[in-house]
Image (spheres, rainbow, N blue to C red):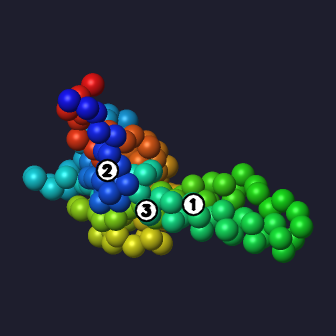
Amino acid sequence: MTLDLSFGTRDAASKGAWLHLVHPVTKEPLYDGPDKPVRWLIAGRDSEQYQKVLNTQQTRRIEDSAKTKTKTLTGERFSAEALDLLAGLVLDIQHSVFKGEALAPEFAAIRAVLKAEPWIAEQVDEYVMDRANFLPPSKMT
């Protein structure tokens, strides 16, 4: 049998996979009641969404550079772009409440949570970068 390299990473990552958030200290999975896991549907690094956000950021950098003739990259800008990237990869949310209100799967709301709660941003970032979260195990090794 020949190993076929068409794993479908782009499609799988674009569909996303559910990240079950865990407590930042105890690492226990979070629930909002019985059978209500706090989970977010995340697109992976091979997804169309990931590439779209990166392309937008790179285009903005090029345009800004052309306008100002100086380098406009700062640590603050990189941090902001990282939050934008992560927020842009959240496709859906289940059983998540932030500051007493149900969290909507909208870019601005997600970005605000990721900025206010770095432990969530860290979990999303780690999840996005691990292809194993989006693909089934290999049948051949």
- Residue type for callout 1: Leu
Alpha carbons under labels 2 and 1: distance apart? 20 Å
Front residue of 5 and 64: 5
- Residue type for callout 2: Gly
Which residue is under mark 2?
8
Q: Residue at x 78, y 70 (%)?
A: 64
Q: Earlier along the polypeptide chain: callout 2 or callout 3?
A: 2
Front residue of 67 and 110: 67
Tally of numbered tags: 3
Residue 17: image location, x then y, percent: 28, 53
| Element at label 1 | helix
Which residue is under mark 3?
48
Question: 10 Å neighbourhood of mark 1: few (<14), some, or many (≥20)?
Answer: some
Q: Residue at x 34, y 40 (%)?
A: 5
| Element at label 2 | loop
Q: Hey, which residue is sitting farthest top in the picture?
A: 141
Q: Which quadrant, please, contains the C terminus?
A: top left
Q: Residue at x 75, y 72 (%)?
A: 63
Alpha carbons under labels 2 and 3: distance apart? 12 Å
Above/below status of 45 relative to 72 = above
